[in-house]
Image (cartoon, grey):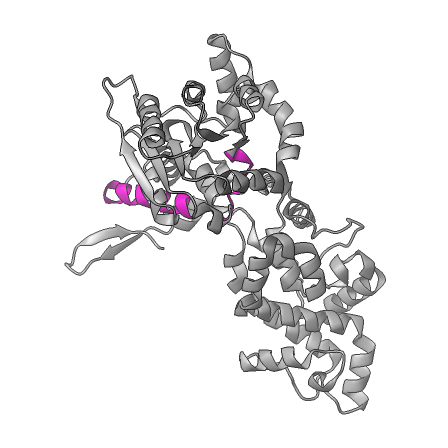
Amino acid sequence: MGKRYNISNLNELAEEMRVNGTEDPVAEIQEESYEDLCKTTVDRAEVAAIFAYMIGVSEDVLKKYYEKRYSALLESLNTDREATIIRYLCNIRTILMKKFTEVDNRLRYDISNIDRMEYFDRNEIKKLTEWELDLVRPNYRAQDYAYLVTKLIDENIDACIRLFPDSVNFEYIRSAFVPPKYDSKAVMKEEYNKFRSKRLDYPFQRYIYWKPFQYGNILSSDIKLLNVLYGQQGKNFTEWYKYHDASDGTKQSIYDFIRKSKKIVMAVDCENVDPYKLFGVLKNLDKSDLALIDRLVLYDDYHTTIAWDFLGRLIDIPVEHVEVERVTEAKSLVDIRMAVGISSAHYKDEVDSFILCSSDSDFWGLISSIPDARFLVMYEYAKCGIAIREALSRRSIFHCAIDDFYRENAGDLQKIVLKKVLRNYLPGVVGENGWELTKQIYADAYIQATDKEMERFYEKYIKKLRLKMNKEGVFEIVMEE
């Protein structure tokens, strides 16, 4: 399998292409990332939608901003007990901040309580009680409730960590919900005064712990929200490039191609496609349209990643895995076998349409040799030159980059492969350096990753390896799931 390149090692790729007499890809990718990427991608707002739900943004606003793209997410949040607990508690705290004096006076002089005040949603308080969060207390003042609610948020918010991508530092999310030293009356008084004087700067006037500023709508996209939350901690959010997705236009073109096909096959050149990126494509396309694909054919040889062996377990499309033997160690026949397979599918099986996943320029000859077949081509920016893309456009063949698709909700495949590789190392792991082992695991899995990504795996799995005695009384090293 050819070497994979990303932003961190583009200089190596540029040097190799200079030696080989080909054009410098760096300028090409820089130009695309600034212009073409803007045309073919949109900013995600999944993290923003979850955060908005949890801080108590109203249903009307949630629908207005997120229902078109994230209707399924909003439905799942409404049935998620842990997220809803935080939402209801944040609603109560925001009301306390907005109506502090009124609430305190009624608690003090009217012998009333928050479950009988029109400011609060009685159904939400009742539901919290059913969930064993004893909220209504006798002889409490508004300040006491502000502390109690914040304490309950502090005790329950960690259950929501599973809602956020691994690349997000959950502590920065958490900090927006839990002020430090909230048990101090001075701290909560300061928060009340800050909210009262700068309420319009808060996201939809919902209370969070932060240094308010006129950022505009911080919930408009994941990138904007995470930039602000990281900035509040004096940090830079450096993994912004993960939080975009293919545009609606790109996805609609794929759907149109599928729907207009009589019989369609997706053919993958495993030597020239990143399996994790392709899984991101499949994860973020509509399942009902993908169900129209007859089969996904993987043309592979033993030099590629084991990830291809697991892809079929995570998707609903029937998978055919074609292992191609090599005549010599240096010569792969995957491209030839793929061409033969596609030709056979067209002429013998009456397949009229193909989604061709490859960044190899050799596929152009295949397309030209079957003029009556329909093709849609998916590639990677760094591996497919502009000349080929322009040729596809001139032939009115739709093409798109798998790099454009969101992958943060498609980490299942990476986790399976990384754990599989780690298990292979477990019997002989004693004496190994943990960090060097982590880097080797990523290399074996063919995953290009930043140090931060590898550090997360290191902290979550490598550092938690344990010695355990099995049923036969034999010691073995085990990995926490």
Name the side, left or right, on which 386 lies relative to 335.
Answer: right
Q: Residue at x 66, y 29 (%)?
A: 34
Residue 33 in the image: x percent, y percent? 62, 29
Residue drawn 64% across the image and 23% down it:
31
- Tell me if 109 is positioned left or right of 354 in this view: right
Choose top left, top right, bottom left or bottom right for residue 265: top left
Residue 364 coordinates in the image, percent (x, y): 45, 20
**Residue 302 image point, x, y percent:** 27, 30
Predominant secondary structure, magenta span? helix
Q: Which residues are magenta?
A: 402-428
Q: Nearer the viewer, residue 111 or 433?
A: 111
Left or right: where does residue 141 sit relative to residue 370? right
Question: What residue sits 70% from the left and 88% below the top?
Answer: 139
Q: Quadrant of the N terminus?
A: top left
Residue 172 lies, with reference to residue 243, above or below; the image says below
Q: Quadrant of residue 443?
A: top left
Q: Is residue 421 magenta?
A: yes
Q: Residue at x 37, y 39 (%)?
A: 296
**Does any portion of residue 433 appear in the rendered image?**
no
Relative to 151, residue 212 above or below: above
Q: How many numbered circles does the render carry?
A: 0
Residue 19 drawn at (x, y percent)? 47, 8
Residue lying furthest left: 472
Q: In the picture, which quadrant includes the C terminus?
A: bottom left
Query: Is the residue 380 above or below the residue 124 in the image?
Result: above
Q: Is residue 8 visible?
A: yes
